[in-house]
Image (cartoon, helix red, strand yellow):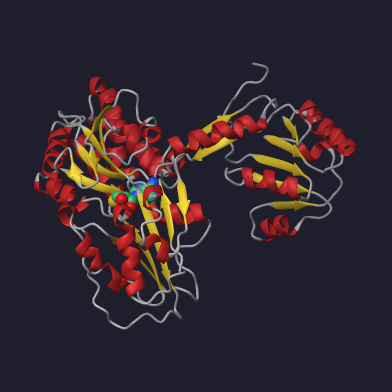
Amino acid sequence: MKTFPMFLRMEDRTVVIVGGGEQAAQKSRLILKTSARLVLCAPELDPELADLVADGKAQHDPAPVTAARFDGAALAFIATGCPGMDAALADLARAARVPVNVVDQPDLCDAYTPSLVDRDPVVVAIGTEGTAPVLARQIKSRIETMLEPQLGGFAALAGRLRGAVARSVPRENRRAFWRWAFADAPRRLHADGAEREAARLLKAAIAEGGAPDDTRTGAIALVGAGPGAADLLTLRALRKLQEADVIFYDRLVDPAVLELARRDAERVFVGKAVGACAWPQDRINAVIVAAALQGRNVVRLKGGDPSMFGRAEEELAAARAAGVSVDIVPGVTAASAAAASLGRSLSERGVSDRVIFATATGVGGGAVQSLGDLARPGTALAIYMGAAKAPAIAADLLDLGLGSDHRVDIVCNASTPHETRLSPTLSDLSEGCFSDRITNPAVILVTVPKDARPHAALPLVRVGAVA
Ligand code: SAH
């Protein structure tokens, strides 16, 4: 290592930044995260820096810079934008024995600024000794996804409780207590926004003299896996996957998403195929609850958004009936992914003023009677589970009075490498011309514009009749 990473105390210290433009502003933003006093040396400041001075967050020194200006400073940044002047100013700072960073001139630097992952007071600094700033940023992005945004708050809470732990938890129990605090229910609750509950749990454990005997409290998370592409997963879903002891997943979940789980997490395929459930829902409910009651962290990973045609309510009810804590992590639903793939918006101002998510397949694989009723003027309709019924749906829409050349969009396997998109006319679709190209899973998007004049309330039962 040619450099050595250290965390410098900044309280009651001064940081001098020489320069009044954008580069100086960038360094100021960084230093303002700390409790250091900031002095800006430049004849003139850009509006952002001038505002900092006006708000009392920095001090402005327009006088010519001398070595004395750096006396006692913790750090100096030189950012005049003029290479010759930068070198001379860096020498002045060095004469005052202050570590100096010259923006964009690694050869003139005593100190480099790392890429930071900031969960104050938890801070991760990544440095490459100036060789590869882009790599540092890539590493930073990876670490950003690993650490929940609330982690700093949790660490601060732990810090506040340190004294109480030292008083009430016997020395031999302390390590186990902190392991429990950071790896189990307290951190999980805090990360999910239940800060008070987390604090209450920690304080109860401190009062008891250590982590609960059963140091693991099982829980179930119904996690949205998104439409397929692994990078459409939410950060929270990723965290839940990495915390899971066991993951129950179904057919719509892409293998790439499962790859993101902890290596030693158990993975159980509960094989739900459309209409035919290899695992009946009752059995899924029973196994996820049983796993949680054994104290395991259970993720029930569901395609798209768990609350969209995913029978989440049955799993929620089973968990609650057994007294198991359960939460939902929303995901990107198939209709959103389909619209994104088409490069269009789900709702369109002036064309549709409502978006309806509907299933073409009802309970037990049967038909939904009233799908056509929904296609009123001004409606964008996203139809799920309708691949096999597309001709019948098109026929209904024709009956409703939409023109035979009206086009609908069908996106199969949205966001996956197997994605296909079709935009057939209603007459072609109703005649089954596209049937062999519509593969499951598929979303059908139908826009009935505001100015469409479909027949008035025609009773529409054909989708039902086709089932
Ligand atoms: N909870 C899921 C929907 C489950 S119902 C979600 O929010 O997306 C199953 C239906 O979802 C499929 O029949 C299909 O209509 C739709 N679907 C799921 N993934 C899809 C994908 N990648 N592309 C197109 N449609 C998809």
Task: Give the answer, above or below, for where 135 lies relative to 337.
Answer: above
Q: Quadrant of residue 433?
A: bottom left
Residue 336: image location, x then y, percent: 42, 55
Task: Give the answer, above or below, for where 313 lies relative to 276.
Answer: below
Q: Is residue 463 left or right of residue 345?
A: left
Residue 344: image location, x then y, percent: 51, 60
Q: Is residue 207 left or right of residue 146?
A: left
Task: Give the answer, above or below, for where 228 lies relative to 309.
Answer: above
Identify the image quadrant of the N terminus.
Answer: top right
Q: Is residue 252 left or right of residue 268?
A: right
The answer, for residue 305, to whether it is visible in the render is: no
Residue 199: image location, x then y, percent: 28, 44
Residue 454: image location, x then y, percent: 37, 80
Q: Residue at x 74, y 46 (%)?
A: 24
The residue nearer to you, when weighing 425 against 298, is 425
Q: Residue furthest right?
A: 84
Identify the image quadrant of the C terminus.
Answer: bottom left
The residue nearer to you, when weighing 177 against 82, is 82
The image shows a total of numbered marks equal to: 0
Q: Quadrant of residue 151?
A: top left
The answer, for residue 324, to whether it is visible in the render is: yes
Q: Residue furthest left?
A: 321
Task: Give the answer, above or below, for where 462 lies relative to 245.
Answer: below
The residue nearer to you, when weighing 102 against 255, is 255
